[in-house]
Each structure stands twice: as C-alpha cells, then as structure tokens.
Image (cartoon, grey):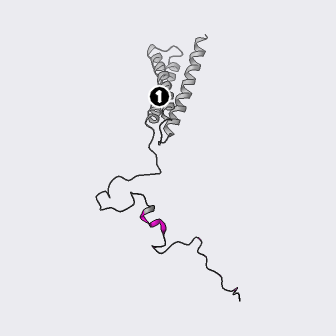
Amino acid sequence: MFNYNKRPKYRILTPVTKQEDAILENPVFKYPEDIPSDGAQENGPKVNYLRKPASKKGVLSFILSLMALLLFFAVLYFVIGSKGNPAENVSAMAGSSLVLSFFAVLYGLLSFSEKDSAHLFSWLGFSIGGVELIIWIMTIIAGSGT
C-alpha cells in the first residue's frame, strides 16, 4: 500500500537549469538597462543603483573645515613661535579660521537636506568644523576674561 523506501525528491536550493523555469529571466522583471536593445544605446551610461553620489554641500563643508583646520594649526605654530605675542596677520588667520569653521558647520547642516546623496563628507565637515568652532569660541571666552 505505502512504499516507504521511495522518498520524494525535493528541489530545495537547487539552481534552475532550464530557461523556461527561471521566472526572473522574463523581460518583465528586468531593469530597462538590462534588456538588450538594437545596439544604439548599448554603450551608453550605466545606472548604478547601489552607490549614491556625494552631497555637493557636504563636500564644500568638508573642504571648508580642512581649510579652517590648516589655518588653525598655522595660528598655533605662529603663536607658539612668537611666545604668545603674535603679529596682526596671525590674528587675521585666526579670524579667517573661525569664519571658515562657522560656514563649514552651516553648509554641513544644509547638506543633510539633500536627498538621494551620500552624507559622509557632510558628517566629516560638520564634525570637524563644529569641534573647531567650539575651540575658537572657548579661546575667545578664555581670552576675554583676562
């Protein structure tokens, strides 16, 4: 009545070998870029669905924060070299570094509103500029008290 020696063959995790069995090979389920055309657009630009372009304001924020960081270290070098009595151009560099770090934070915040873009440079510019801005504000507060 029952044949226990005969086991049913299950096709779990076995690849589909026939073309007609693979439903995802149907052109209905493909992206328009993957469907072969007449050859005119075959060498055209490819669309990458995985990688997002960098945020333009985020890149600007990162560049501004790097410029402010460069000026910050230059100011430290010249102040230490002059033993605490810097020239006027060092004060101008310090003010420029403060302004650049402020705009780096501002553009970093504005870049988060850009949709469909990667925000790595936004986070880097915002964080580096924010730390610099806090250091400059603390330096101004500490210097005005004496």
Note whether 15 is above or below 119 in the view shown: below
Q: Residue 37 sits in which quadrant?
A: bottom left
Count of marks overlaid on the render: 1
Is 24 magenta? The answer is: yes
Which region shows up in magenta?
4-27
Question: With 33 as the anchor, is 77 left or right in this view?
Answer: right
- Name the secondary structure under disc 1: helix
- Residue 89 rendering spot, x and y as whole percentages: 43, 16
Q: Residue furthest bottom?
A: 1
Residue type, numbered disc 1: Leu
- Residue 84 rendering spot, x and y as whole percentages: 54, 15
Note whether 132 is above or below 115 in the view shown: above
Categorize mark 1 by other alpha carbons within 10 Å: few (<14), some (14-19), many (20+).
few
- Residue 133 rendering spot, x and y as whole percentages: 54, 24
Q: Please name the predominant secondary structure of the magenta segment in the image.
A: loop
User: Which residue is tagged 1?
Assistant: 70
Is 11 magenta? The answer is: yes
Residue lying at 52% horizontally and 22% vertically, measured from the top left: 76
Residue lying at 32% horizontally and 54% vertically, measured from the top left: 44
Quadrant containing the N terminus is bottom right
Q: Residue furthest left?
A: 40
Quadrant containing the C terminus is top right
- Residue 143 rendering spot, x and y as whole percentages: 58, 14
Q: Residue 42 sits in which quadrant?
A: bottom left
Task: Compare residues 39 and 26 and report the one nearer the observer.
Answer: 26
Q: Residue furthest top?
A: 146
Question: With 42 as the anchor, is 66 left or right in this view?
Answer: right
Residue lying at 47% horizontally and 16% vertically, measured from the top left: 91
